[in-house]
Structures are given as structure tokens and as C-alpha cells.
Amino acid sequence: MHKIQADANSSFKTTMHALFSIPELLWIIFENLKPIDQRQCVSVCTLWSEVVLDLLWADVQDIKRLLNVLAPVQKKYSLEDDPRLRHQNATYIFDSPPDHTRWIRFQSKYCSRIRSIRHWDSQQISSLMDTLTSLHASSSTSPILPRLQTLYWCGPLETLGRATTFMHPDIRNFKTSVGWSLDPNLTELQSYVVTIPNRMPALTSLVLDGFAWPEYTEPIVQILQAFPCITRLDLPAFQDISPFLTCIAPSRRMQNLSFFSYLFFGHRVRGVVERISPASDNDDFDCLNSLRLVVSNYSGTVSFIQSHSLHSLNTLSLETRFAEYSVSVRVLLKALASSCPNLAKTTLISCYAMNVDALQDAYVDDRVVGFDDMRSILTCRKMSHFHFRHPLPVCLSDKDMEEIAMAWPDLEELELCPHPLVEIYPEDAPTVLSVFHLTHHCLKLHNLSLYLDTRLSRTPPLPTSPVTKHADLKLLNVGVSEMEPEDAPGIAKLLGQLCSADCLLVFPPLDETYDWELDEPIESVWDVVAKTFPQFSKVYKAHGGANLQDEDLQHEVEVITRAMDLEKFQSTGIVDVD
């Protein structure tokens, strides 16, 4: 790393290699170090100190941390009798007001390093911000954080005024909340219409979080009209998003678009998109790279997709609150295949908040998705991530899975309903042979989630493949796949041939059960398979594969198999132990 040279007086002088004087190289090195190691590099030399401090202060996720270098910050508790309320209502204040010397040091040493700053409502910092704003107003007219590019200010509408302390014309990314109050707050939101465009006219990314009150539509449209160059927009899932699409479409620069809502305690608190009016111009979203929607059903989305040429669309996330019929899935995937040929990352989530009892009585047969419903999407040859979740399991055979594997050679993640909510078992379900097809055709595959038919009587033998290369799975999620104890050793052997010993086997844990006669917990079949298949994997790897003519291999496999105590397995119910 460095050279040591002796001078005439036999003292030593250290000369650093020239490579470690290149700031760009140092940045790459330092950003891969742990924070404790980064801080130690500060004291090496002036150059290293500057690079490390730039790295450490580039993204400030706690404003208190930043203000603590201006002057020590302390937590002031309220005088409530209830200890919980004292903590909940605590505020942060300066231990002593910062003087002019501290302010000059703060400006010269830290302010120009910060590129991103984030504030969350849980940080009670009103006193700190008032002091900071006052110091800045009395000493300078330039931005307090002149190189700030990203400002996240998430809190009540009335706190936006404090965020203006950090706003300046060069900010490109802004995220804030339009409010979580149970009633729309139009008065406060109107301040956004003036403040955001005037203070940050060069914004290219705008994220507004909160409740999707219909009354908020017009003020937000007014904000968007001030930003013709915006490339990213994240909004709550308003029932009608047509006004927003009409506003942003003429710019033809939108790259990332999201209308999303979250689930809290099983309830969607901000609604879903119910209306998407297709535009007349087929090329107004030709730069769109990513689209994320929460919708009531697929029909409106299909109309939007069919009326646009989305050739640049790479990533799609679509969630619906309706348990879509198989024909709706087929129509959607056909529209995607036609309008989005370069689609690479797709997530389709259907009705995970729906009442399961209601679903069981709701025409189940018409909702089971099969390969014919999915076939059209295979023309999107660049697919690398495909996640499909539905309340019912998909109906796919091993032959279907082989066709999927051959159509998507760049596949890295595949999820096909490993956790159906209703116990309806399809006529065709993939076996371990499907894992073989996917790992041998999709060499980049690392995450696989499937509902498997684990019956050995229905599992074809694995081909003796001349191909030596195959995917190295990092995770295999078998979801709620059931398995009988007598099939467990065979499945463990097959997984040992297909997965490395480091592969994580994921399955739902059993409810806590305990066998008092054995004085130990009862394990599920999958628990024991997860412990055993890595042993098979190591043996097969050591012998160069599953060679049936290798007597030493067969002996080692037999030893592992005999060690599997089948009487302790548990499948759907508890296995009686005599």
C-alpha cells in the first residue's frame, strides 16, 4: 500500500502510492468499507479526510445528526405524568445556542458536502430548525446546503414551511406528504402550489405521499403544470388518474410513474385507481421505463396499455384488489406482450386483501390461471424478473415450465403463486423436474418460488444432462407445497442434485407443536428436508454428479438417507409415533 524510505538520519518517511491519491478511486474504496473503518480513514491525511467526509455526509438521514455538529443537541422530555407520554412528546433542543464561530465552521466544513437530506415526522426538531433558519437568514443569502440534490420532508402539511430552509433552485428530487388527516386540508396544500415551483423550479422527480382525497387533484395538477421536464412522479392511488396523465403526457419525458397505496392492518387506507382514460396520442409515454399501479381491476389498465406504445417500458408493478378471472389475466398479458415488448421486470399481485371465505364461493374454476392464459407474455424475451401472485394456484405442467424456461433465458427471479390462499389443487402442478428445466435453461436464476407437486409417483426422473453449467439458486421458496413423509428422502435427493448446499429452502413454519413423549418439538417434513438436502448436495458435488454407477456415491447417499428419521416427520397433520 505504501513505500517506506530511510533518510540520512535513519528516521523513516512514509510515501503513499500515487494510486491512493486519486479521489475517484478512493471514493470507490471507501464506500465499500464499514462506517467504523471509514471514520478511521479521516485521520490518515488531508486528502483522505476530504473524500471520507464527502462520503459520510453525502446522505443525511437524520437532521439531528447534522445539527449536532453545529452545536450539541439534547432531548427535552415533557412534564407528563405518564412516562410513555413524556417520551412521545419529547423535543430536541440545542444544549446551548450556537455562536458565530460554530456557524462558520458548520458552513465551511459540512454544508457543501450534503447531496441528500431526509426528515421524518417522528423527529421533533422545531426548535432546532427555528435556530438554524434564524442563523442562516442573518448571515447569508446563498442556499444553506448549496449542493443539495434530494430533499425528503415527510410530515404534516403544516411543517412544509420549515423545509423551505433547505430549498433552492438546483434541487432535482423532492418527496413530501400531502397529509394523513382524516379530512382534506386544502388550505395547507395550496401553499405547495406556490412554494414547490418557486423554490425548486428545476425538479425532475416529485413524490407526494398521503391520502388520495379527490379534492387534492386540482392543486396537484397545478404543481405538475409548472414542471414540464419532470421524469419521475409518485402519487397516491387516486380513483381517477386521468387528469394527471393528461397533464404530464405532452412533455413525453416521463420515465417513472407510480400511483400506489399501502395496506395498514389489512385495510387499504388510500383507495385504488378505478379510472384511467386512454389518451389520443399513442406516443405520449414512449419514454416510460417504469409503471406502478394499484387498481380495482385489470380492465382499465388494459385500455391504457393498448392505447399506448410502451416500447421503453422495462418495469411494471400492477396490484389489484379483485380476484381476477383467468380470462382477465390472459387479456392483460396479451396487451403487455403487444405494447411492451421490452418488458423485463413484471409484478402482478391479485387480491391479497380479499376475504378468503368469499373467494371460496366465487366461481373458483373461472379464476384458476393456466399456461394458455400466460403463453402470450413469453414473447417478451428480455424478462428477468416475473412475480405472479393470485389467491389460487396456477395450473402449470413440467412441460409448460420448460417452455417458460426456454423463452426467458435471462430470468433471474421467478415467482408463480407459491402461497395460494385457497386450497384448490390444480390438475397440473410443477414437480422438481421444473426446477431442473429452470436451472438448466436460465443460468442467471437465483430466486425461485413455486407451488410444487412433491409426490414422487408423479415426479419424472431428472434427465442425464450433458450440460455442466446450471444456475446457482440462492433461494427456493416452496410456499405451502405439501409433502408426505415417504416422499421426503427422494425429494431431498433431487434437490441435492439441483441446488447447492448454500441454497435457502423457504417454507411456512408449523404452528408450535410439541411431542411430550419424545420431549422435543415435532418437525415438519420440510424442516428435515431443509437440513438434509445440503448433505446430498455436497456428496453429489464431490462425486461430479448423480452417477448411478458410482458405488461410493451410492453408499454415501444411503448413509444420509438412513439417518433421516421418518417417524419424526409431520405433513398436513401430526404423525403418530409409536
Image (cartoon, rainbow, N blue to C red):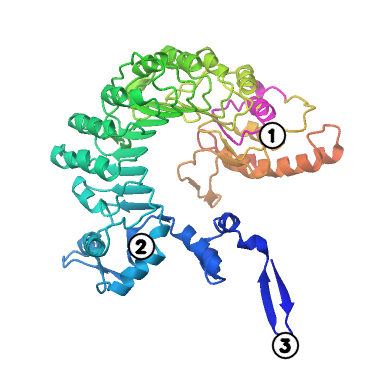
Of label 2 and label 1, which has the lower sequence position? Answer: 2
Residue sitting at x 44%, y 22%: 286
In this view of the protein, which residue sits in the foreground, 307 or 409?
307
Disc 2 vs disc 1: Cβ atoms closer than 8 Å?
A: no
The answer to whether residue 79 shows anywhere in this view is yes
**Which is in the foreground here, disc 3 or disc 2?**
3
440 is within the stretch colored magenta: yes
According to the picture, the residue beneath numbered tag 1 turns out to be: 498
Using the rendered view, name the quadrant where residue 191 is placed: top left
Q: Is residue 265 visible?
A: no
Q: Residues within 10 Å of mark 2 (few under 14, many from 20)?
A: some
Q: For mark 2, what is the residue?
A: 66
Residues at circles 1 and 3 in contact by the CB criterion of under 8 Å: no
Question: Is residue 409 a member of the stretch shown in magenta?
Answer: no
Magenta range? 434-461
Mark toward the viewer: 2 or 1: 2
Q: Which residue is mark 3?
A: 9
Query: Can you name the residue that lies furthest to the bottom here?
Result: 9
Secondary-structure class at tag 1: helix
Q: What is the distance, in whole Å, between disc 1 and disc 3 at their CAs?
A: 66 Å
Q: What secondary structure is found at the residue carrying circle 2?
A: helix
Q: Are marks 3 and 2 in contact (CB under 8 Å)?
A: no
Q: At label 1, which amino acid type do we have? A: Leu
Tell me the quadrant of the picture where the N terminus can be found: bottom right
In the image, 279 versus 154, the foreground residue is: 279
At which x and y percent is residue 129? 24, 60
